[in-house]
Image (spheres, rainbow, N blue to C red):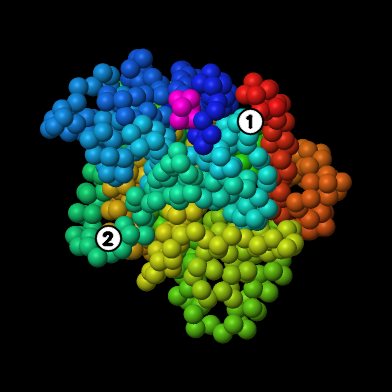
Amino acid sequence: MCGISGFLHLRHSYPAEELRNIAMRMADTLRHRGPNDFGVWADAEAGIALSMRRLAILDLSAAGHQPMESANGRYIIVFNGEIYNYEDLRNQLSKGEPAYTFRGNSDTEVMLAAFERWGVEPSVERFNGMFAFAVWDRADRSLTLGRDRFGEKPLYYSRNGSHFIFGSELKALRAYPHFRGEVDVSAIALFLRHSCVPAPHSIYTNTNKLPPAALLKISARNFTTKPKPYWSLNEMINHTSAAPFEGGESEAVEQLDWLLRDSVRMRMRSDVPLGAFLSGGIDSSTVVSLMQAQSRNSVRTFSIGNHDKELDEAKEASTVARHLGTEHHELYVTSEEAMAVIPSLPQIYDEPFADASQIPTVLVSRLAGQYVAVSLSGDAGDELFGGYTRHDLGDMLSRRLDDVPLFLRKLWAAGLRTLPPERWDVLFRACRPAIPARWRQRMPGYKLHKLASVLEIQDSHTLYQRLSSHWLDITKILPGVSEPPAPFDHQSFRRPAEEMMYLDTLTYLPDDILVKLDRATMAFSLEGRVPFLDHRIAEFAWRLPLNMRIRQRQGKWILRQIVYRYVPRELVDRPKSGFGIPLATWLRGPLRDWAESLLDENRLRQDGYLGYAPVHKIWREHLSGRANWEYHLWDVLMFQAWLDESRKTTHQSASFENVANVAMGNA
């Protein structure tokens, strides 16, 4: 695991030493992603420099040092991630013509040998892993960027005149002397709807995220090419629908058990201490069960606890850990300790990001980082196997409301809005013992009001957008700004639940869930691995009939059958909870001064991005208790806090630019 960065310049006038200095400065911003080693390579004639910070996981020797050159000298690579099937590829490359003799035992060297034999794109199609890389081809003077199928590892790039820049995080791009960090207001609109900036967009103009499953080849002669997909979720689903799984339930469980076991086994390869996040839910319990079943020693597991019993998951995680026999570590966090993380969030996430579960993710990553260098997680089980409430809810709404007249839907919606969300929360708490477990939700009032907003919708795509959005009417807070269109192909599905899982895998998973995991773990030099994102598992999941994923209004049916083999069902069959954050209460209490400083009228008007009147309106309503606007306010606050942090780093980069211009004779 590493942080990578670099640039290519069309005018080949920079001295090699200056290229190296710029690349070193870019890499220094990524020290947290790779504290173990540092490397830089530059070619003044070509106008290119590559740099990296290394977190050594496989082959801790100097043989794993990057940037790394291929055996024949054609390719030079910087690489972030892991190729889990590198041993199989290595065996293939050791045979045939030419037969490669490897200097070390790193997956990076295997990647380069694969590029030599098969070429870049055919090699990437063979990789099973998480990765973001940049490889320079000396033969045709081109730079190729690549990213894994689901977007586990990040990669940004920017074109600015004769400059092409790339890096694992935006802070590396801001360290480039000619980077122009102009905020893209259309990206703010996307952020307010999704609580993140979805690929291929970034918060800056002329700067993009490389989409998952894509390659971008840049010639030293021009920068006009576009990313090219080497794998497509859309095409994969079409292929699997033409060859669906036709076996029985027991056969399906056996096959998935084997695939998951093999995926976990591959992701347990490490030359450094390894563990796993454990919440006690279906997904993380499945991963830990399969880890412990294949380990000679007790697996280290980590969870965060909350002193508020309604928001705590550590007790369940501890019970599962005791049953499996793991070496369990848990930390009960006070509200003060959790809130102390908030000032560091803009620096950690480096782009506006407002999924409030970022706070516990940072906390559990910090805990795990004290003991291990690699941690497996249960992320992506929901997207692949129908685990989110909206999957079942969207399916149910679509099927049951199709024949309901619109005027009647509006009456139901009005009825749900007769009580504010807080009053609904009180009623649900009072009636909790009588409510079936699957209907027990955190913040039921907020969700009922969201349900009211979707009752009149008939199109399943619009229904998904409404269920997954925060700010529904962006024009109220960003007048005159329109959202960019969705960049993905629409897919036809027989059931809305399948469409929602598809859209979640394309958008919510890479842009929210995986960003949250990557930035939080990397902040503590911890590598996060996601066994569910082995592409073989995704392909198998989409071959299954829907009723093997969602059954009797409950998601992840087939995963439950697997985890029940290792853990008694009473230990894991419980409502989805997570480490809850009482954000609404915090904003009215201990975070109020911090929030009001960011929402100051003069400040908002001076920034010129967000409308003061709509922000001030929901802030007053929230403080009074008449409404709960915690999610909407968190979006605004995280954007404002990010603005502060970006201005600090932009100022530092501007100072460096003056020095660099003098050194290069440009001033």
Q: Quadrant of residue 434?
A: bottom right
Residue 224 position (above or below residue 554): above
Percent x, y of residue 641: 71, 39
Report the residue marked by disc 2: 240
Residue 238 position (above or below residue 173): below
| Left or right of 623 on screen, residue 524 | left
Percent x, y of residue 233: 36, 56
Please report the bounds of the magenta region as a residue range. 43-51
The amino acid at mark 1 is: Pro
Residue 395 position (above or below residue 9): below
The label on residue 177 is: 1
Separation of residues labelled 1 and 2 (CA atoms)? 48 Å
Quadrant assignment for the N terminus: top left
Residue at x-position 42% and y-position 59%: 502
Residue at x-position 22% and y-position 49%: 255
Count of all numbered marks drawn on residues in the image? 2
> Is disc 2 surrounded by few (<14), some (14 to 19) or many (20+) residues within 10 Å?
some
Residue 44 shown in magenta:
yes
> In front: mark 1 or mark 2?
1
The amino acid at mark 2 is: Thr
| Left or right of 213 on screen, residue 586 | right
Percent x, y of residue 297: 31, 23
> Is disc 1 surrounded by few (<14), some (14 to 19) or many (20+) residues within 10 Å?
many
